[in-house]
Image: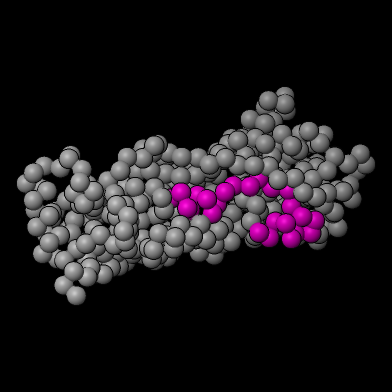
Amino acid sequence: MADTPTPAVTISAIAEEAGVSAPTVSRVLNGRGDVAPATRERIESLLRARGYRRRGSRSRELVGLLDLVFNDLDSPWAVEIIRGVEDAAHAAGSGIVVSAIHRRASSTRQWLQNVRSRTSDGAILVTTDLDSSLRAELEDLHLPAVVIDPVGVPDLAVPTIGSTNWAGGLSATDHLISLGHRRIAFVAGRPELWCSRARLDGYRAGLETAGLGVDDDLVVPGEFDYESGFRAGEHLFGLGDPPTAVFAASDQMTLGVYEALRRRGLRVPADVSVIGFDDLPEARWASPPLTTVRQPLAEMGRLAVRTVYRLIQGEAIESPRVELATELVVRDSTAAVPDSPRG
């Protein structure tokens, strides 16, 4: 029994006691030479004293626990991210703790306090503003972190993972233009999010490339939820000259637009074409099935796990900013622009 690893002894715990980062401990475990002799000796002494041993037969060190942190957990979009993270973590024998901080400083402080008590090995933060104070807290905890869909401009000091939002916005707009639409509305996401701004920029680029001006009356704000999509639809189809097509920056907002159209007696796509973004599972079951831009949400989660593992091991990553490809999925909610006036 003396050689059996103690489950509570983690890389992060050894790093904290040694006063170094978790990647430094991993470099020692992996026999890397880029560690000062005195530091190596201190870490090896702690590893022996705490009875730490590698788990599993492979040379790559396994990770015991990862924290997955969202601002909110009230969206199918979040469920898809969780699915990808859980797949990759389960395959590696790691546990996942899922938290929601609701964009509140008090919740963030509580989460950090919880992390200290459970000695997580790494963190994946979703749509989070990784400001200097939070980054300093994570560094103090020796907690490697990866951000999925950062709030602001990606910080190259912290690896980030997203999708090709600009290209997705462009492809959606080009598709509607190819069907003859010229009055194309856009329901935007939260403006502070990098992905929201990129999708809007792709929409604008599509219109401008086709020689169409951007009508500011057709660009309305949203919150990436059903309710804001419904409000946007009510506004757009209350205009004197409403659009013939709507591109919403998330599937959930698109379904809200569907409801606004239904209440006005307008049909999709006979009267109005509608296109979304995400390709959530319910997109194919909408009536009619929704044309949308697929972003690989589960794969973004899996890649985040693989990236944070590499950071924990002290390994180099290929790029601090990774964008996975989006893909236009054409279903039944888009059609050629109607020839006759709508009711």
Residue drawn at point x = 80 percent, y = 50 percent: 332
> In the rendered structure, does residue 129 fall within the stretch colored magenta?
no
Q: Is residue 225 left or right of 318 when viewed as pictured?
A: right
Residue 66 showing in the rendered view: yes
Q: Kindly indicate the quadrant of the structure image that contains residue 160.
A: top left
Residue drawn at point x = 68 percent, y = 25 percent: 209
Q: Which residue lies furthest to the bottom in this view?
A: 1
Nearest the eye: 62 or 222: 62
Nearest the eye: 48 or 10: 48
Q: Which residue lies furthest to the left in this view?
A: 38
Return the x and y of residue 51 as percentages of the image width and height. Answer: 16, 66
Nearest the eye: 139 or 339: 139
Return the x and y of residue 235 as percentages of the image width and height. Answer: 72, 51
Q: Is residue 14 left or right of 171 when viewed as pictured?
A: left
Q: Give the range drawn in magenta.
A: 281-304
Residue 78 showing in the rendered view: no
